[in-house]
Image (cartoon, grey):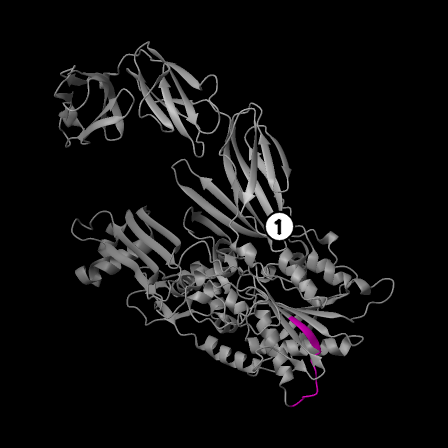
Amino acid sequence: MSYPSGGPKDVRVRVSYTDGSTWESHLLVVAPAPVAAARYAGSGPNVLPPFQLTADRDYNGEYASATISIEYGGRNKATPDPAVLDKPLIVVKGFDVSGYIGGPDARSDYKEFVARISNRDNQSILSDGADADGYDIVYVDFNSGTDFIQRNARLLERVIRWVNEHKTGTQPNAMLAMSMGGLVAQYALREIETDASNPAYPHQVGLLITHDSPHQGANIPLSIQMTVRHLAGTVIRNPIGSDVVLAERFPLLVQARNALLSPAAQQMLRYQTRRGPTQLLQFAGPVVAAPTSLYDAFQQEYQALLGPARVPVGTPGRPCRVVASSNGSECGRGQPFEPCAELAKAGFDGEVFDYPFLVGVGIASLTAVVGAGTLGTLAIGLTGAYDLKAEYRLNALPDQQAQPIYYIFARVQKRTRLLGLFDVQLTLMNFQASSLSSQLPLDSGSGGIISLDAYAQQAGGAITALPAGIIKQRQFCFLPTYSALNITPGGTAALRASYSPGTSVGTPFANFRTAARQNEGHIEYTALNSTWMLQELRQAPQVLSCQAFCSAAPVISGPDVVCAGGGTTFTVAGLPPGVQISWSVVADVSVTQTSSGNTFTLSDGSAIGLATVLATLNGDCGSFTISKVVSIGKPNPTVRNLAQPGEPTFCVFTAPAVPGAGYRWYVDNRLVADANGIEFEYYFGCRITHVISYEFINDCPAPGARPSASVTGECRPRTQQAATATLYPNPASESVDVHVENADDDPQPLTVRLFDSQGRPRAEHTGPAGQATIRLRTDKLPAGLYFVHILRGPQVLSRQPLQIEK
């Protein structure tokens, strides 16, 4: 596989088996970005060997440490003169679960950061610009990226002092802090500013950019957390063998649980779960939505430390400018699903093979009936097939309602009774958990997103044998926009509010940037936010409101049909200001296209087919594409012959689907009344030929000849099965009896359907199983030729003509 750009890629594999089942697997891969064209490379003579720094101040008796990587900027390369650190850009990494999940190879490092900022949409705006300006990157990679935020903040304070001790000149430090790193950075800077024991020591940070940081908390769907907490603690007792400990069978469950219980996760996650009271039988206690004490305690401490300004302010003579970037939509657009929508759903109802655990289940369920002393003699009777019925469902948070959001059920039952007397059945799981009425619908809100597929990869490794259709939503809101801007939410409205730069929205930051029309991936670097960050580094702040881009609802105007031989013009109505249009077309036939500004012309010559006209709108606020499907020319109909052995021949004619068009159908150039749909059905007698044609009802002029198809009815002997059905009387007037011989030999009931000569259903009746004769009323039908279809279940036994006379 190859990709035009680097970064995380979700590889989806689907396998379809001959039995009709379909399975999917998802694999998250990181494609290395081609950074050769970018200014920062992540390796080479301008990159110092990584080294370790340890905090010189503890938090609760322990010291944090980090791996430090340094790459010198463009004005300051190692050749021909020795490089010096004179314009530091301290980059602070965010939350990192590699200590719990995925092992050391899953750890992201400085090279991954360089790739992330270097090649978004084949642009390297931030990388090239910062390097050209001579910024020397000092990358801080916490050795424990899930530790207490305060402990890692003490480590960052040590990094800042190291930078100040080793840099040349008086250039203020700049700092870019991603995700959790924004909290660590603000905490560290404010602790330095308020350190009474050393009030004269300045941190020398003149600019801090927090990039999609959870100042008011982050979000992982509560139902996903409940799944992990519940299943990671499940132990199934087996009376005749070893217990089944799900955590041992699936160690990633424990890894995910430990990550959720890490100090930093508990300090950042707005909503969390806790264990409930232990259940009887074999399962660990369920989980319930709960208050988040660590989150609440940290928020109180964090917001209080930030002080009245709610951001670091610097020291006298060395002010600190703090700005924020959010990957949430400026337009306030939520996720593509509503509160309480299904996030995932799975079910199973069928046979499972004999398994020692199931035998143990049977023994456990019989103990109270026959006594433990006799179980040994009965154990052999517990082998065999079992039925398993299971259901699993996850929902997004509702809007401040107590609603079930996590449900899991599993029950096994032996197919045959033990000794013909005892049912062997046990409910393994039957549990649901609900949200709290105080909780906001964060999952569906506006903000930086995480792919549900990719998150499952990061939290659970490669998913194999995942049935198709389990995951219902492909993403969720991880970092609400209000949180990235440190705005206290007043209710659900905060999740869909429009936060436009340059307006008063209640944020403490000197400037901020949001993601225009659509939500973007958490800490994703785009052309829009990269340009904004670079302008901040250059002390030329950009304040760009995309509100007009948000409210625009452009559509492509033009006809639905491109007529044969002509040129058709399309334009965009409702165009937002300041955008340029790039036109293109995807067609299944050869077409000619020309464009100029807001005008696009499509010519087809004499082609016949379908096309999609695409208009990509590009501007300072990003880009998006709108489309319009059009029909080209007048295609011929397709014919499906549905006849089975016997007469008459039954055909269905299908015209191409043309947006906004109607149809007229003709038989031998005679217009058929009421036949105006995309399909037309007709019967053809033995050696009888008819020409079926149609025309579009649209803006194109009628062609000289209508598209048509000629069909001659086949003459084939009826099958023995079809010959057993008789109609009486035929011709009929008031009613007709349909009799099928040997009907009582089959448990399936008979169904008789009556169609007119145009294939329209006119009557239907289903009799009880074993009934051999079915009567249809015909007294209200006009005279003419009709056709009787005789079915047993879904199988058509016979099609026979019926003449109705008056």
Q: Position of residue 569 (x, y in %)?
A: 57, 35
Camera-side residue: 745 or 482? 482
Looking at the image, the residue that sits furthest to the top is 687
Q: Which residue is drawn at 71% across and 80% down?
A: 318
Q: What element carries label 1?
A: loop
Q: Position of residue 119 (x, y in %)?
A: 67, 53
Image check: 490 left or right of 156? left
Image check: 626 left or right of 200? left
Magenta region: 197-208
Q: Quadrant of residue 752 in the image?
A: top left
Compared to residue 168, the image places residue 44 above or below, namely above
Q: Where is residue 144 in the image (x, y as percent from the top left)?
A: 58, 71
Image check: 357 left or right of 46? left
Looking at the image, the residue that sits furthest to the bottom is 197
Q: Residue at x 29, y 57 (%)?
A: 360
Magenta segment, prevailing SS (helix, strand or loop) = loop
Q: Where is residue 645 in the image (x, y as percent from the top left)?
A: 30, 17
Q: In which quarter of the image is the N terminus?
A: top right
Q: Which residue is drawn at 43% across and 34% down?
A: 660
Q: Is-magenta flag for residue 91?
A: no
Camera-side residue: 742 or 507? 507
Camera-side residue: 687 or 658? 658
Which amino acid does the dot numbered 1 rest on?
Val
Compared to residue 666, the image places residue 199 above or below, namely below
What residue is disc 1 on? Answer: 579
